[in-house]
Image: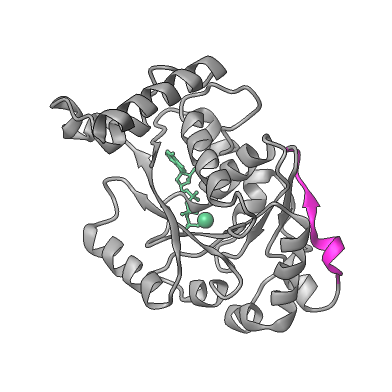
């Protein structure tokens, strides 16, 4: 799957949440597609705790976590997003909430689990921030108290999305995988090299982390020479925006996909 790069989107820097009710803004249909895939993957409720990963920094993990949460929330799923990028916590900014009173305070026994969950302005979406400074991420992530937190959120929410640090820079993903059901792996189009992707995937495989899906972020169709030559394969199928993101458009796109699948058999 792929999410398009936004070049001149004045909202991106400011809020970075592009998904909203009935939105047909450029780019939001990619989240609809991603959301629908995750709803399918988690239809039995067994793949609900998902770590959002990528090889490097700035590949769009935080943006995807936030927008995906909002998109799931709009389908009446209860979602909690947790900032587990302890070194560069940013989720609170995206949702316009304070960073304090999060995981750090819960771990120090200053706040109970109920008191660290913040309601966002988006329907069905809650947030747990990092809180004040955390000096020993690994110790926190392997602690029984942290595991108990995730276990109780698992009971209460339909989805628990974990915004993580880059795989090739920080090894926290290994500890996080012990409480998650799998990873969504992001690749920034035109930036991350094949070797970096291969190294990161090797790390995830080595630690038996199930990759539930991979996603191109910042995808720039114009730079993809394959389109100039009538490319109609995987990306053509998934990113055909000609129908728009309306109920009619989605139904038309679904019909087209069924026909394509039939033809391929
Ligand atoms: N689709 C997009 N098109 C263009 N820019 C984007 C897109 N998605 C996110 N960005 C921008 O790219 C930058 C990095 O995004 P983001 O913070 O989501 O990445 P990240 O992988 O979480 O980074 P880090 O590893 O540093 O936490 C941000 O400035 C964000 O606004
Ligand atoms: Mg981030």
The chosen color scheme is one colour
Answer above or below: position of 38 versus 167. above
State the residue in front, 161 or 156: 156
Residue 3 locus on image (x, y percent) = 41, 38
Residue 98 locus on image (x, y percent) = 74, 53
Q: Which residue is drawn at 48% across and 17% down?
A: 249
Residue 63 visible in the picture: no
Residue 136, image quadrant: bottom right
- Taking the image as shown, residue 13 lies to the left or right of residue 225, namely right
The boundaries of the magenta stretch are 111-122
Instruction: Look at the image and say whether residue 121 sits in the magenta stretch.
Output: yes
Instruction: Look at the image and say whether residue 143 sits in the magenta stretch.
Output: no
Q: Residue at x 75, y 42 (%)?
A: 124
Residue 83 locus on image (x, y percent) = 63, 60
State the residue in front, 81 or 152: 152
Residue 191 visible in the picture: yes
Work out which quarter of the rendered image holds the C terminus and state it. top left
State the residue in front, 195 or 263: 263
């Amino acid at each position: 799957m792929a999410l398009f790069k936004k070049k001149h989107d004045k909202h991106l820097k400011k809020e970075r949440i592009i998904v909203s009710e009935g939105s047909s803004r450029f780019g939001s249909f990619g989240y609809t597609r991603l959301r629908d895939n995750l709803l399918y993957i988690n239809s039995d409720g067994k793949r609900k705790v998902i770590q959002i990963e990528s090889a490097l920094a700035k590949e769009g993990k935080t943006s995807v976590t936030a927008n995906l949460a909002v998109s799931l929330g709009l389908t009446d799923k209860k979602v909690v997003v947790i900032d587990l990028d302890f070194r560069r916590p940013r989720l609170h900014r995206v949702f316009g909430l304070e960073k304090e009173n999060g995981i750090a305070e819960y771990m120090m026994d200053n706040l109970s689990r109920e008191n660290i969950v913040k309601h966002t302005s988006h329907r069905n979406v809650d947030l747990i921030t990092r809180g004040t400074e955390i000096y020993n991420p690994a110790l926190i992530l392997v602690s029984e108290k942290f595991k108990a937190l995730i276990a109780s959120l698992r009971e209460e929410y339909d989805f628990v999305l974990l915004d993580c640090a880059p795989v090739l820079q920080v090894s926290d993903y290994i500890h996080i995988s012990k409480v998650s059901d799998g990873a969504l792996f992001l690749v920034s189009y035109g930036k991350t090299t094949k070797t970096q992707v291969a190294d990161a995937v090797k790390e995830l495989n080595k630690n038996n982390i199930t990759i539930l899906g991979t996603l191109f972020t910042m995808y720039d169709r114009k730079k993809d020479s394959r389109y100039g030559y009538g490319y109609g394969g995987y990306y053509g199928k998934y990113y055909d925006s000609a129908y728009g993101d309306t109920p009619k458009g989605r139904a038309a796109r679904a019909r087209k996909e069924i026909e394509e699948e039939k033809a391929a058999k």
